[in-house]
Image (spheres, helix red, strand yellow):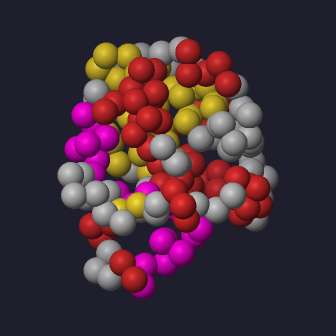
Amino acid sequence: MRCDKCTLVFVPPSDYCTRAHELSRYALHNNSLSNKNYVSYIAQLIPLLLCGSHRKPAVLDFGSGPARVLEYLLRRENVRCTSYDPLYDVNATALSQAYDIVVMNEVIEHLRKVGDECARIGECIHPGGRLVVRTRILDNQPDFGSWWYKNDITHINFFSISSFSTVESIVGCRVELS
């Protein structure tokens, strides 16, 4: 389906997979500190997170997964990073704090209540803070039907650049795409 207001392409709730199926799909990933390729992929975010700041930012990794790789890497840089993941019961109190930067690394496409979750994130961002999102952008796909990214059953939101204008209005800050 496609939202006429924000151009978000999304899967209707009636077609969501079960949480158990979702977790079993994530279990196929090797998103851990022992996976050098994954660690390198996550490490690419660090220069973006640290640029333009005169001090070390407080960071929330929203949807960290159980391994907390970004938290580990940022702590090596003496940056306070808090991990949060509702599916893996990681740090349920994390959303009661405020952060300079919230990172959603390949997370926003999975959120079942994306508007509500973005509103929660907005409450966690200091004024002048940043939301950094890494996801595949629908605008770059000439043919949605043959796009491999939509075939992951856990991907239920597909954003265009214009969709992120709506996200910005919900969270109250600029969204930086990585």
Is residue 150 found inside the magenta-colored segment of the image?
yes
Q: Residue at x 51, y 26 (%)?
A: 59
Along the viewing direction, whichever of 120 and 141 lies nearer the viewer: 120
Q: Residue at x 70, y 53 (%)?
A: 19
Q: Residue at x 32, y 75 (%)?
A: 141
Along the viewing direction, whichever of 111 and 52 lies nearer the viewer: 111
Residue 81 coordinates in the image, percent (x, y):
59, 26
**Quadrant (top left, top right, bottom left, bottom right) of the N terminus:** bottom left
Instruction: Check the image and report above or below for 169 versus 123.
Output: below
* Residue 172 in view here: yes
Instruction: Check the image and report above or below for 61 versus 107.
Output: above
Q: Residue at x 47, y 48 (%)?
A: 108
Is residue 8 found inside the magenta-colored segment of the image?
no
Residue 116 coordinates in the image, percent (x, y):
44, 35
Q: Residue furthest front?
A: 14
| Image quarter of residue 16 | bottom right
- Which stretch appears magenta? 146-169
